[in-house]
Amino acid sequence: MTIPLVDLKAQYAGIQPEIDAAIQRVVNNTAFILGKEVAEFEKNFAAFCRVPHCVGTDSGTAALHLALLVLGVKPGDEVITTTHTFIATSEVISLIGAKPVFVDIDPRTYNLDPNLIERAITPRTRAIIPVHLYGQPAEMDPILEIARRHDLRVIEDAAQAHGAEYRGRRAGTMGDIACFSFYPGKNLGAYGDAGALVTNDAALADHARMLRDHGRSEKYAHKLVGYGYRLDALQAAILGAKLPHLDAWNARRRAIAECYDELLTNSDVITPYVPPHVTPVYHIYCIRHKNRDALQKQLKAHGIDTGIHYPIPLHLQPVYQNLGYKIGDFPHTEQAASEILSLPMYPELTDEQVRQIVDAIKEVK
Ligand SMILES: *Cc1c(COP(=O)(O)O)cnc(C)c1O
């Protein structure tokens, strides 16, 4: 029996009647673009995040792009973010003509180290994008304090952190805007591409809502040059069917993580560090091992899939050569990139499978 990294078939099997009914409902009434399904999901996802406003988009990347636009980030501005994330986080900064300025991680949490942010601030800095990597919230209080002191906007990249909490506040409620991805493998996943931004600010939400739909205020009255970034009604219906399960799925992910943690004590593996004031949702369960490549090979031989999130830090990506970074600039990220390994993690994973994975891990020295 093989164990995949993520098992979307197992999830569908558990909720098939609800998903099928949602799809059929949209097909029956043929309201495929925006409309009631999208508005309903936006309302429910905002409530889930405990924020007043949600704007659905066709991807998490689109949500990040809109966030920078409505916060007024302009060509030539600088935006500070972590070098240890998926490229979409910084891609949108570049897309606007602004400059990504990378900062190293705290090696224990893999999140942006707040102590390194201030030295990266220049007169051109406009915003900070902390990423709640692997579903664990970044250290938001010091980040928000630095932003306040320097008059910077904060965009939470919450693409991996639906439902995670920091000092009792949900991911998505702390910055000026937060962006979520509903890529199929995310904790809340669509059956295709989808995303959303959430905010406490009605004016920012209205602006983003207009920009995502060709800058229009009425059907053929266009006030702004906008984008085709709408959330698809079919995806909204599917997401709406899944949303009531999300808290239970996240709780199961935490139980699986606890099982891994316990079975891996006194092994050669470093398990995730979770500060006491944080409740993660384990989009990814990431371990560290000195002999990572051998470990990955060994697990593969046992039919166990693993991943590396992410093998090449953003400051060393070919596309960012022009930014002038070099090997050694962000040592914590670079070392992590060579030692991290993501183990199978999805709510339907059984305790028995976790034991099987850990047994295979313990064979590697
Ligand atoms: C998935 C992801 C994104 C992009 O989301 P898409 O929906 O794939 O566009 C952005 N940032 C992070 C950290 C992600 O994991």
Image (spheres, helix red, strand yellow):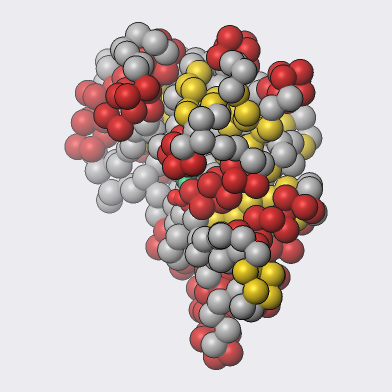
Q: Residue 347, relative to residue 220: is it above or below?
A: above
For residue 241, what is the image quadrant?
bottom right
Against 229, is 146 above or below?
Answer: above
Residue 62 locus on image (x, y percent): 51, 52
Q: Is residue 354 left or right of residue 50?
A: left
Residue 330 appears in the figure: yes
Residue sitting at x 28%, y 49%: 2
Q: Which quadrant of the figure has residue 239? A: bottom right
Name the residue: 66% across, 61% down. 209
**Residue nearest the viewer, comparing 86 with 282:** 86
Quadrant containing the C terminus in the rendered view: top left
Up-down relation of residue 218 to residue 80 (above or below): below
Residue 179 in view, yes or no: no
- 119 sits to left or right of 313: right
Q: Quadrant of residue 25?
A: bottom right
Task: Provide residue 49's location: percent of width, then percent of height.
Answer: 72, 49
In the visual, does 205 lie left or right of 22?
A: right
